[in-house]
């Protein structure tokens, strides 16, 4: 019997393909569309969007407050006076304008 120390071509081919597939799936798990890096990007984007949502909700609450204060049910005369002066650009005779 004559045994060679070289592995068979089929064995080398099988392990080459298995190693290549393992490397492909490892790469995809880290950098693919659903990989770890993409997950980190999505979490960071979600945090930014949450911050923007909080800012928008604060702005909406402020605008709702101003709208309610100028409504027919509740009229804030100081706010009405301030808005009128801002829109019309007028002052009273006893006021001084500082720019």
Image (spheres, rainbow, N blue to C red):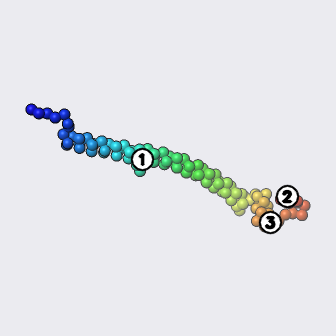
Q: CA distance from mark 1 to mark 2?
A: 59 Å
* Residue 7 visible (yes or no): yes
Q: Report the residue at 61% width, 54% height from top.
A: 56
Is label 1 in contact with label 2 (beta carbons under 8 Å)? no
Check the image and name the residue furthest to the right: 94
Give the residue pinned by disc 1.
31
Q: Report the residue at 82% width, 65% height from top.
A: 90
Label 2 crowd (10 A; few <14 / some 14-19 / many >=20): few
Q: Quadrant of the N terminus?
A: top left
Q: Quadrant of residue 97?
A: bottom right
Disc 1 is placed on an element classified as helix
* Residue 68 visible (yes or no): no
Give the residue pinned by disc 3.
89
Is label 3 in contact with label 1 (beta carbons under 8 Å)? no
2 vs 3, front mark: 2
In the visual, does 68 lie left or right of 48?
right
Q: Position of residue 34 (x, y in %)?
A: 41, 48
Give the residue pinned by disc 2.
98
Disc 3 is placed on an element classified as loop
Q: CA distance from mark 3 to mark 1?
A: 58 Å
* Mark 2 or mark 3, earlier in chain: 3
Check the image and name the residue furthest to the top: 1
* Mark 1 or mark 2, earlier in chain: 1
Is label 2 in contact with label 3 (beta carbons under 8 Å)? no
Q: Position of residue 41 (x, y in %)?
A: 49, 48
Label 3 crowd (10 A; few <14 / some 14-19 / many >=20): few
Q: Which of these two is toward me, 15 or 2?
A: 2
Q: Quadrant of the C terminus?
A: bottom right
1 vs 2, front mark: 1
As displayed, is residue 7 above or below residue 94? Answer: above
3 vs 1, front mark: 1
């Amino acid at each position: 019997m004559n045994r060679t120390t070289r592995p068979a071509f089929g064995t080398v081919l099988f392990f080459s393909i298995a190693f290549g597939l393992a490397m492909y799936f490892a790469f995809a798990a880290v950098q693919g569309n659903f990989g770890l890096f993409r997950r980190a990007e999505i979490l960071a984007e979600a945090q930014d969007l949450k911050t923007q949502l909080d800012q928008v909700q604060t702005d909406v609450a402020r605008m709702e407050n101003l709208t309610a204060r100028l409504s027919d049910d509740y009229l804030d005369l100081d706010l009405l006076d301030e808005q009128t002066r801002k829109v019309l650009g007028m002052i009273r005779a006893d006021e001084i304008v500082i720019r």
